[in-house]
Image: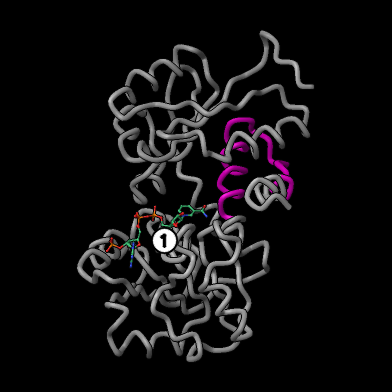
Amino acid sequence: MTIYTGKTKNLGVIGYPVHHSLSPVIQNTVLQSMHLDYAYTALPVKEELLCDAVFGLKALNFTGFNVTIPHKINIMQYLDFIDDAARLIGAVNTVVIKDNKLYGYNTDHEGFINALHDRKFSLENKVVTLLGAGGAARAVIYSLLTAGIKKLYIGARNKEKAQKTANDFSHLGTIEVCNWQEEKFAEWLTQTELLVNTTPLGMYPYTDEMPPVNLAILPTNTLIYDIIYTPEKTKLLLEAEKNNHTILNGEYMLAGQGAAALKKWTNRTDIDIDLMRIALHKSLTGK
Ligand code: NAP
């Protein structure tokens, strides 16, 4: 049993609701296995109490905290420093408290890219197609454009909204946007080497849904990456497997963002991301 003492450092996740968060499980599993004297808890914070909570955590001498829905954007106004990636992505999911100052980061983009590195999938010069252009897509777009890809296409149900998102990143690379029902979208798919779903289509409980993609026209070596992690295999991934495509789900991204946050709080470079991923997989699937 873990004993917490007066020296134990505090970490947590603020959100509302937050009881379903898997962060306490994955963070505490790794903290305990590395014998790091920290405790990580879920902290329910209602929207109207965000300011009180943030300054409360500072007053309580927390080492840092994760930020989840609905606070990822609103938190930014209370921070002393926001790193460039988080500012561009427009959301903070990790805060470090140091010398009474609040430092904000976005580790989702690290989680996304680390999953591909783990697969030994090089992004250099690749043609990538993204489905959807919401909040998570912003972290994905940042990752892809800073990783040396050749071309980024975005297909979405709402072309105007997606174009607005793309415009925010246009200084990092070329992005073309269309409605995924347009004819040219099919043409883009035939060139695609990595297809990433960032829409919630197929996420539990709507597991019989999938984005309107004709997988048969994708090259056979295209990697299909769905950032959804419940279910383990979305309909998109199941169909992709039937087409003999390699697949990747969102579990590694989720574990990767957690590992990147823990690195920032502890200054340890040896965080065991695999242990975090295994703890996450067990929590999600019971296996
Ligand atoms: P979001 O901000 O609401 O964005 C969702 C995007 O999907 C938008 O582009 C939206 O289009 C589109 N969309 C939503 N419902 C749709 C539908 N029925 N048909 C077509 N397009 C639809 O959500 P988010 O925060 O980006 O999250 C998206 C997914 O990513 C969720 O499943 C979430 O669990 C997952 N995620 C995973 C991780 C991870 O670590 N693995 C991290 C973050 C998010 P409109 O703009 O037209 O509404």
Q: Is the N terminus in the top left, top right, bottom left or bottom right quadrant?
A: top right
Asked which quadrant contains residue 119, the reply is bottom right
Q: Secondary structure at mark 1?
A: loop
Q: Quadrant of ligand 1?
A: bottom left
Amino acid type at mark 1: Pro
- Residue 64, given in percent of the width and then of the height, sits at 52, 27
Instruction: Give the residue displayed 49% in from the left and 69% down from the top.
Output: 148
Would residue 152 be found to the left or right of residue 224 on screen? left
Q: Which residue is mark 1?
A: 200
Corner quadrant of residue 25: top right
Residue 256 belongs to magenta span: yes
Q: Which residues, given as a range, are shown in magenta?
A: 253-275
Q: Is mark 1 within 8 Å of ligand 1?
A: yes
Q: Residues within 10 Å of mark 1 (few under 14, many from 20)?
A: some
> In this figure, what is the number of numbered marks?
1
Magenta span: predominant SS is: helix
Q: Residue furthest top?
A: 6
